[in-house]
Image (tube, rainbow, N blue to C red):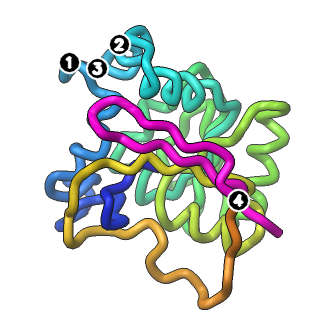
Amino acid sequence: MSMSLDGFIAGPNEGPDNGLGDGGHRLHELAMTGGGADDVEATRRLGGVNGKVLDEFMATGAVVAGRGTFEPAGGWGGDHHDGVPIFILTRHDPADLRQWPLVTYVNDVTTAMTRAKEAAGDKNVLVHGAGTAQLALAAGVLDEIELHVIPVLFGQGRRLFEGLAPEHVELERTRILEGEAGVTHMHYRVQR
């Protein structure tokens, strides 16, 4: 999850036509080298720390996201990366939603994470969206958290950890990397 130094994963005025909020694209510049559709691949080819982290991101075996992330992203055209299965949390009847072969709609985070982990096999599951990450953490089905801290302050927007239950969650830091353009990549294991 990319976030500002003050904990925001989207800027202010986030909405269906402004999925990352005002200025939110700044959080994803670590993957963008030239402003085009092939930016992630170009960054990966450049190597460096950011390229290594993107390689790991793209080596995941399944994706879990909420509709608030999925829909503004255009459903990633039905394929997030490499044909991996995508599990979308929704309270609505899937018959009302766009159907793509790789996309499965589920109504609870535990089912989504269980099915995604099974589909991913020995690979990691990529979780998109603050709400989905918070639900997975609260349900005890989120094993790791990777944060890409961008050196910018938003002051407002959508926070990654806002609204968590008032319980103590211990994390074990397993890696910290200094990326290009001031990005700090931190990886944590959730302690149970």
Task: Tell which tag, 1 or 3, sits nearer the viewer.
Answer: 1
Q: CA distance from mark 1 to mark 4?
A: 35 Å
Name the N-terminal-most of marks 2 and 3: 3
Q: Is 50 placed left or right of 94 in the picture?
A: left
Q: Which residues are magenta?
A: 172-192
Callout 2: SS: helix
Q: Which mark is residue 42?
A: 2
Q: Which residue is mark 3?
A: 37
Query: The C terminus lies in which quarter of the figure?
Result: bottom right
Kind of element beneath mark 4: strand
Q: Are discs 2 and 3 less than 8 Å apart at CB?
A: no
| Residue in the picture at 43% in, 19% down | 48
Question: Which dot marks residue 191?
Answer: none
> Relative to 190, is 125 above or below?
above
Q: Badge 3, how many Cα within 10 Å: few under 14, some, many 20+? A: few
Which residue is identified by label 1? Answer: 34
Query: Vertically, is 92 above or below 126?
Result: below
Give residue 102's position: percent from left, percent from top: 62, 32
Give the main secondary structure, helix, strand or loop, of the magenta stretch.
Answer: strand
> Which of the two labelled residues, at mark 2 and mark 4, occupies the earlier sequence position?
2
Cβ atoms under marks 1 and 3 closer than 8 Å: no
Q: In front: mark 2 or mark 4? A: 4
Q: Nearer the viewer, mark 1 or mark 4?
A: 4
